[in-house]
Amino acid sequence: MPETTKSPPRVGLFVTCLVDLMRPSVGFAAVKLLEEAGCSVFVPSQTCCGQPAYNSGDKATTRDIAWATILAFEDCDYVVAPSGSCGGMLARHYPELFIDEPQRAIKANAFAARCHELVSFLVDVMKVQKVSATFEGSVAYHDSCSGLRELGIEAQPRLLLKTVEGLRLVELEGSDVCCGFGGTFAVKYGELSDAIVTQKTANIAATGADLLLAGDLGCLMNMAGKLQRQGSAIAVRHVAEVLAGALDEPPIGAPAPRVRQ
Amino acid sequence: MTVAPTSAQFKTNAHEALGDARLQRALPHSRNFIGRRAAAVARLPEFEALRDSARDIKNHTLAHLDLYLEAYERKVREAGGHVHYALTAKQANDIILDLCRERGAKSVTKGKSMISEEIGLNAALEAAGIEAVETDLGEYIIQLRGEAPSHIIAPAIHVTKQDIEADFRRVHLDLPRDRDLSQPEQLLGEARGILRSKFLAADIGVTGANFLIAETGTSIIVTNEGNGDLTQLLPSVHIVIASLEKIVPTLEDASQLLRVLARSATGQDMSVYTTLSTGPRRPDDPDGPEEYHVVLLDNGRSSMLGGEFEEMLRCIRCGACMNHCPVYHAVGGHAYGWVYPGPMGAVLTPSLIGVAEGGQLPNASTFCGRCESVCPVRIPLPKLMRHWREREFERHLSPRLARYGLGVWAFFAKRAALYRLSTDLAMRALHLIGRGKGRFASLPLAGGWTKYRDLPAPQGATFQSQWRAKSGKVK
């Protein structure tokens, strides 16, 4: 529960396995945004939210991982993840896992109520209205499915992106349509996933944007990987990187040594 | 018997569908429904509240289905009709065949009915030497083509105008060869002319039902072509074939459901025809059949009651889930391999034909949740698909390689310290290999990904390792 005193809220960063492993700069951008919003940020030891097991039907493994996560973040006022998918898992699906275990269910429900996706947490809970960042160029924003439909994240990222100096937000047709990632779906049904992401990259290319943003690294890796396979020059980043002004690292899938403007 | 399912070969079916240029030209039609539904919903401020009410009506009915079935049956009998219960598809076909044989029927016209597809009624009739004529234009077209419907409300959505012209020229041989069939109106006119004679010649008319009203014993069908009315009014016998869960308590309930049905389906406020029939023709009626029969099909549904999949029985067959499904958009309905495609098919198919046969379908979803977000009766389709994956996993039906991979991953994911150490080493190594290009065009063990797209290279040390080094804040 949030403390009633003036001390800053203790936010546990659930960094997500993909950000932890593939793109730590998104984690640091999240820390920066949270600290600027007045939070004190902690990073408990963690692995994954358990979705690969959950969506493969392995409920026992999911429960083990979920319970370890719940315990690891026990003393945080809030748990924040730079992902709508993992955020949705923590906030919406963890309670379902313990429905038959009343003792654990109490804790799981209390935990879930403290969980948020990063950008919606900044806007809805911390009441952040603007960021102090600059990006010169046009940006297309993709609404990742779980964030959009499980957590209602739609207005919040757009609200903050519009306060980034120099940034022009362009309309992406079908921005609410799945990119075809779907976790293990992208590999188990690779050809089908490819057909879906090909439709998505066609829409992205049609915007003429310089940069594609979204709030989930899984979707971003899928779209970036496809754009690059197609030879597209459109850069791809996590929305937190732009909001935090953390653009030192090259965009997703871009070569390391070459420094962009 | 019912059509032999190929759902277990979904992957192969999908591969073929993706490579079928003709099909890929037709498939974008299914997306037209999206904008129409959105516009219809926008015109009705209480739409979301109506979805709640629709869900509640169906939940209430399912909780008391036995009572409402009995009440319905009583009312049908009071109106002079007959009710037949069929536990299986075969029983349903046998009941209908017996009714046909006893009356010496040679020709049966049919309104659009997914239940008749489920039981394979056309094949059963043809095998008994009885002509079955589909009278819904879409159904008529696919009957000519010898195909199953690829969509539950737009059965021929997978064919183009050119395909239909070719089919009509192939089958309607007694019409002038040089006739112009280039316009949709001409195709429609030709089908109408042919079907008119079939309507008049039919001995028995078979329709489905969108709703069965317990309060009055009425069956309701909604159509856009009026073919249903001609099917059930002109022949001397009208047979309604419907599954148990089509029951709703009252006409008032049906009106509520009708308000979400067409809007969710085609974006119409109402379908063009909403036809109510109660029993056979009464002395004062201007027209109607002499006999009225209802065949109520179970076919596995009663075993869904009270279980994990009961919510699926709320489905009112609007097709919104498939209209909004990225997988359906990519491959169309036939790839699903049986009768019901799209998300509702992915949940219902394993319920009706078994998880061993239909278990691929609930796996072939990204869980994007768009289906649930448009479902008029709020069926949590992704959740129900996940339940099938759980059953499959429990019964060790999922592929061995996938289980093995999941096991290795789970071993590390359950051991945080070991996980941190090993992932840090692995990511540092991958970074060194991939940093020149920033991505991999191919990578051992990642072929499933890199066959279609590049894989971004990791940035180096993991976040947790960097955080630990920087601030020592990891517990």
Image (tube, rainbow, N blue to C red):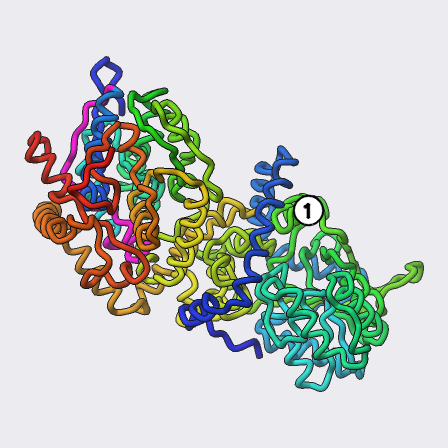
Measured as percent of width and height from the top left, residue B15 is found at 42, 69
| Left or right placement of residue B182 versus residue A32 in this view | right
Measured as percent of width and height from the top left, residue B40 is found at 64, 41
Residue under label 1, please give it.
B268
Tally of numbered discs: 1
Q: Amino acid at mark 1?
A: Gln
Question: Mark 1 belongs to which subunit?
Answer: B
| Left or right placement of residue B383 versus residue B439 in this view | right
User: Given the current orientation, which residue lies at the most extreme top position?
Assistant: A6
**Quadrant occupied by the N terminus of chain B:** bottom right
- Please report the residue visible at 26 percent of the width from the left and 16 percent of the height from the top: A4
Q: Foreground residue, B273 or A65?
A: B273
Depicted B158 relative to depicted A43: above or below: below
The span shown in magenta is A38-61
**For residue B147, what is the image quadrant?**
bottom right
- Please report the residue visible at 76 percent of the width from the left and 64 percent of the height from the top: B188
| Left or right placement of residue B380 versus residue B281 in this view | left
Measured as percent of width and height from the top left, residue A57 is found at 32, 58
**Quadrant occupied by the C terminus of chain B:** top left
Q: Secondary structure at mark 1?
A: loop
- Please report the residue visible at 66 percent of the width from the left and 74 percent of the height from the top: B143
Q: In the rendered image, is residue B92 in sight?
A: yes
